[in-house]
Image: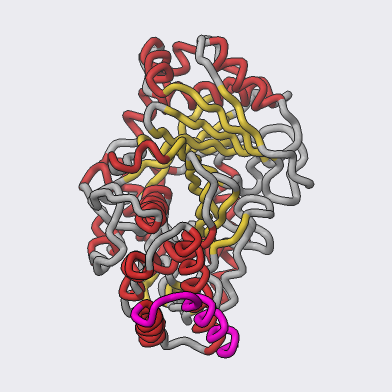
Amino acid sequence: MKQKQNLHLQKLKSGRSEAESVRIDDFFNALDQKLDLPLYGKNLIFQHFIRAFEYYQDQGCDVNEICERIDPNHLGDFFASNQRRSYPLDNAAIIYPLGMKFGQMPMFRLSVELKEDIEPILLQLALDFTMKRFPTFSAVIKNGFFWHYLETTNHILQAEEEKDVPCKPISILLRSYRSLRVLYYKKRISVEFFHSITDGSGGMVFLKTLLGEYFRLHGKIFTYGCCVKNPDELPDEAELVNEFKNAQGKGDFSKFVDKKSIQLDGKLSKTGVTRIIHFIMDSDELKKVSRSYNGTVTAYLCAILMLAAKKSIVRNDGIFNIQIPVNMRKFNHSVTLRNYSMYFNATENLSQIEDKKELIEDIAAQIKDKGDETHMNQMMKITGKLIASLNFVPLFIKVPIVQTVYGYLSNSIIGCTLSNLGVIEMPQELQDELDRFQFILMPGIPNRVTSSMVTYRKKAVFTVIKNCHETVFEEEVYRLLEEDGLAIETEGSVEYES
């Protein structure tokens, strides 16, 4: 492999002046000093830089410009140090590795559609430069005696061309596997996360920072800030805080026990997802329609889901719960990148739903009441109490117990999920480079549907993720939105094999 590297370097220096050849040698010697990796890993990083060098040469960039843009100093000490740091899982994350059964893994995907096709070489280098900024993302899940925990690693994460079913489970038992993957397809960059390392808001910070580094490598100049982190800065310890430990309230469990939800009709898919449908709308028009019913966008979409569920379930005389996550950062302006969301259920008896406007107003009232700071803090307190009750139970005993009850205590009380990430901001200099963002939240078993929402520059993308083949639900969602005069552009995946 060393011989191949030398051949590549000779090719890079071919036809160059002596000064340029010396500059190239100095560059790759500096890169070598940044790498304390096994031979395979070192060769892989060298390949990333050689391919990037060749790419820029083909673009007509001079040697000095190339060396400055992909300066090895952007790697920091990430690949030069074998030191490992451990982090306990946060209170929301701790249940996920416990509750997993074979083929089931709480995953979500954040994507961005660009105006131009992705350049894989630059995306890979952007990933190499970005990982050092997110220590809990560059970590693997390990088994402790009592709990799982995160341990940082400097194994190289490869950006891969997307070829598989979205959010396929990650083999977290292998030391070289992190709890996320980075994918590209035509104009789309996607990051898929195991929920143990972060929630949607934290994941979006990572995606936007990766995106910023990708554009920097394309020669774009922009201002870092709250939208995009500077990957060359040291991680902020406030980003690593487990905010659940700061929860206030008594945590009375009896006040938060929900009844089991009825589920959509249809045979569950074996792949974990059957089809993904994006409903793309003008966000201003969506707000206008929602307000005409005296509701918020979340309340309006929640009602649409309720009505579609009623149409999709033959025996619909029962409670249908829609789980709504609440981003707790809005209450105390926390910057943590760990999980910091809590949940409540909007609940309706489907057979008793008659008037859309009354339904939306009722759901809006539930959101205001159940989703306030006091209730959510109490939910966090309950989570802490449940975890404390298992603190001294060995992990090998915890796992089968939690796997037995996990579905009943969580997914069985949910008929659907509606997770709205809100409006995504990007630096002004980069805004015209992007078309839209997308958010995919995988259904758990026995759920047959989840939904999600994200908005960028007045383009709202409302996504329905199905776990069964029947199409009544999504067809009714479309009809209901169209009935309210919304102009809808739809995009869907192929139907995945089940």
Looking at this view, is 96 or 188 the one in front?
Answer: 188
Classify 312 as above or below 83.
above
Classify 353 as above or below 449.
above
Looking at this view, is 39 or 250 the one in front?
Answer: 39
Query: Is residue 95 among the parts visible in the rendering?
Result: no
* Residue name at image x 66 percent, y 26 percent: 473
* Residue name at image x 46 percent, y 69 percent: 53
- The part of the chain drawn in magenta is 1-19
Classify 95 as above or below 144.
above
Colour mapping used in the image: secondary structure
Q: Is residue 163 left or right of residue 38?
A: right
Q: Is residue 428 magenta?
A: no
* Residue name at image x 33 percent, y 69 percent: 64
**Residue 86 is drawn in which quadrant?**
bottom left
Position of residue 1 measured from the top left corner of the image (x, y, whole percent): 60, 87
Magenta region, main secondary structure: helix
Q: Is residue 9 magenta?
A: yes
Count the marks: how many? 0
Position of residue 315 measured from the top left corner of the image (x, y, whole percent): 71, 25
* Residue name at image x 25 percent, y 69 percent: 234
Query: Is residue 369 among the parts visible in the rendering?
Result: yes
Looking at this view, is 46 or 87 the one in front?
Answer: 46
Position of residue 60 measured from the top left corner of the image (x, y, whole percent): 44, 59
Classify 213 as above or below 265.
below
